[in-house]
Image (spheres, rainbow, N blue to C red):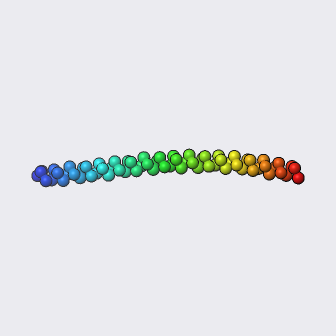
């Protein structure tokens, strides 16, 4: 194999590895965003549930007073 071909093959392998690393980094980032979104969604549901319970209790209190 001529030297220029060896350089070309080496360069192609480097590029392939770089693409693989970027893809893996992207997948890790995607998983992180998914975990954060799930956490925020669960937190929001919990807060809304608590607010709903307080609103129901307040409404029941107002109804009982009337």
The residue depicted at 20 percent of the width and 51 percent of the height is: 9
Residue 45 screen position, x and y as percent: 64, 49
- Residue 48 in the image: x percent, y percent? 67, 50
Front residue (pair 31, 48): 48
At horizontal 60% and vertical 47% (from top left) the residue drawn is 42
Q: Is residue 55 left or right of residue 34?
A: right
Q: Is residue 51 left or right of residue 6?
A: right
Which residue is most to the left? 2
| Number of dots carrying numbers | 0
Across and down, in percent, residue 4 comes to 13, 53
Locate residue 9 relative to residue 24 in the image: left or right: left
- Using residue 30 as the reference point, say whether residue 16 is left or right of it: left
- Residue at the (46%, 47%) spot, across then down: 31
Residue displayed at 56% across by 46% down: 39
Residue 29 or 10: which is nearer the viewer? 29
Where in the figure is residue 12, as x and y percent of width and height?
23, 52
């Amino acid at each position: 194999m001529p030297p220029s071909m060896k350089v070309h093959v080496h360069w192609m392998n480097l590029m392939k590895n770089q693409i693989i690393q970027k893809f893996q980094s992207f997948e890790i980032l995607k998983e992180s965003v998914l975990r954060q979104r799930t956490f925020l969604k669960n937190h929001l549901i919990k807060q809304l549930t608590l607010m709903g319970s307080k609103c129901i209790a307040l409404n029941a209190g107002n109804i009982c007073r009337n």
